[in-house]
Amino acid sequence: MSRRLFELNRHRLESGFSLVELVVTLVLIGIGVMAVAALFPLATKNVNDGRLLTTALGRAQDKIEELQEAGYASSLLTPGSYTDSLSSYVRTWVVQDSLPTAGSKRVNVSVSWPCRQGTQSVDLATYIAK
């Protein structure tokens, strides 16, 4: 009986975690948490950049749709270069006559906005025929 009691006590002492194992585990978990936390600023920046790009593309598409709805003979499609501002976005569009062929107009719309690296822009183009 005494031998059995000794075996049970030894088994209890050997089960569980040592202090060293616990410290190593906590250090590894801490490194993992820090690595994930370091990704949050990058993810936030990418989401913000995507939002700015989507807004700019929407503004460019709005102008193209407005010009297409106006029709070929509209004064809005007089050849030339035009600019307007929408909050921090600057929208520029260029109307060119007889491109690529007579009876059509080429419209280039560019939207630019300030960012950390300077200025970014998107460009869309379409053709409007008679």
Image (cartoon, rainbow, N blue to C red):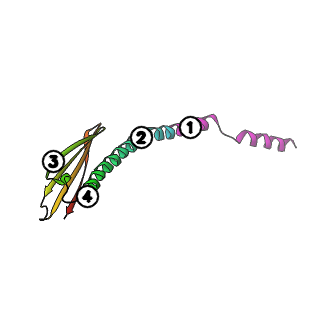
Disc 1: which residue: 24
Residue depicted at 53% across the width and 39% down the height = 28
Name the image quarter holding residue 27. top right
Q: Secondary structure at mark 2?
A: helix
Q: Nearer the viewer, residue 79 or 59?
A: 79
- Callout 2 amino acid: Thr
Kindly indicate whether the residue at mark 2 contacts the one at mark 4 (C-beta within 8 angstroms).
no
Q: Nearer the viewer, residue 34 or 79?
A: 79
Please tell me which of labels 4 and 3 falls first in the chain: 4
Disc 2: which residue: 44
Closer to viewer: mark 2 or mark 3: 3
Give the CA separation, mark 1 to mark 4: 66 Å
Q: Secondary structure at mark 4?
A: helix
Q: Crowdedness of circle 3 by 10 Å Cα count: few (<14), some, many (20+)?
A: few
Q: Crowdedness of circle 1 by 10 Å Cα count: few (<14), some, many (20+)?
A: few
Mark number displayed over residue 81: 3
Give the CA separation, mark 2 to mark 1: 31 Å
Please tell me which of labels 1 and 3 falls first in the chain: 1
The magenta stretch is 1-30
Residue 52 on the magenta segment? no
Q: Which quadrant would the C terminus be assigned to in this image?
A: bottom left
